[in-house]
Amino acid sequence: MSEAKSGLTNQQSADVKGVNFLDLSAQHAPLRAELDRIWDNVATNSLFVGGTLVSDFEAAWAAYSETEYCIGLANGTDSLELTLAELSVGPGDEVIVPTNTFVATPEAVVAVGATPVFVDVDPDTLLVTAETIEAGLTEKTKAVMVVHLYGAIPTMAPIVELCEKNNLHLIEDAAQAHGARHGGLHPGAFGVAASFSFYPGKNLGAFGDAGAVSTNDKDLAERIRIRANHGRGDHLHHIVSGCNSRLDAFQAAVLQLKLAHLDGWNERRRQVHGQYMELFQGHELVKTLSVPENTEAVHHLEVIRVPDRDAMRTQLAKHNIGTGLHYSHPCHEQPAFSQYARSALPVAEQACAHQLSLPMHPMMSRAEVEYVVHHVVENLEAN
Ligand SMILES: *Cc1c(COP(=O)(O)O)cnc(C)c1O
């Protein structure tokens, strides 16, 4: 491989000896003093669950999301499940979900007693489209869960139209899309609600598990809030049999601190993604993802497809390059969900066999991107 073709500059890459898949320590290091103050405040004032740290973050996340309401919850899976439950989706109902997603999406459907119906994805974006969703429609369809996978929002107008026409609840799984926009709008603007996870590795991550629902539906927001707090209507009255899915005050304060950095971190992810795109140009054996028109993605993951994914992964590991698989198997081929498989979903099946997630985080330097690309290309050209 010629230097000119790859655009690599060995002088810059020479010092890099490996690249982490994620680097939360580097991301948190500059915030350390402020994080310590949060911990001190929580411990000194016994602020554990609920309270103003939680309500302040909820208000901040609602404002950021440009939705009326935000309910902080224990994790992202609960936020999907509670949304479905409070929309009265349950036994006998079908919910359409992409098969190329994290298992949490169909888990929430099964948890409320409904049936997940898996659909395929677009070959260029690996996201659902109105056409792939339509293929899963039946008389029993009650809701559609769109997943803003990898930090990208699918083309929403035809999906919104399809759901309106068929009277279906549209729910956005935005666990990988904090800060993404489509047509200028954030998750939560398209469906009845957007569900977020603040698992540490997400674009906005807590110091443990956390999640939230963003919505403009007042009734839904109230119902989820009550259900998640043991069905408590007011201090003394439990009006439904609920559950415990509350957001910890410490997590809320960490999220509030990190929220101020989210746009800057997402901008860095866009730069890192741009560098990958530039350096992979001309290498036909590397298939990169397309982002739908009018979507401003936040690149939660940097996914490529290569002929021999497993060999590539092993090879990159030898050069201390961390990689991930999102996902190694489509949900309908996982033992837990294969009973719901209705047909082959060839695009996702093919993608899962070839996709590999490269290091992607806001602290990555150009030299690190060059190091990763150099070893990906070297491996392809050796085979
Ligand atoms: C992380 C994730 C979830 C679940 O979030 P948890 O907070 O881990 O429960 C749901 N959907 C997608 C697409 C995710 O990536």
Image (tube, rainbow, N blue to C red):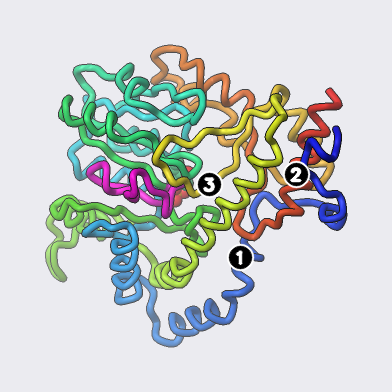
Q: Amino acid at mark 1?
A: Gln
Query: Does 299 sit above or below residue 313?
Result: below
Q: Are marks 2 and 3 in contact (CB under 8 Å)?
A: no
Residue 372, label in figure:
2
Residue 226, label in figure:
none
Q: Earlier in the sequence, mark 3 or mark 1?
A: 1
Task: Give the quarter of the figure containing the N terminus.
Answer: top right
Query: Does 313 sit above or below residue 71?
Result: above
Residue 263 picture location, percent across and down: 47, 61
Q: Secondary structure at mark 3?
A: loop
Q: Amino acid at mark 3?
A: His
Task: Give the quarter of the figure containing the C terminus.
Answer: top right
Q: Which residue is mark 3?
A: 299
Please state if 365 lies on the left or on the right of 98 as rendered: right
Q: Which residues are magenta?
A: 175-196
Decide whether residue 278 is among the magenta residues.
Answer: no
Query: Does 240 sit above or below residue 50?
Result: above
Farthest residue, direction top:
343
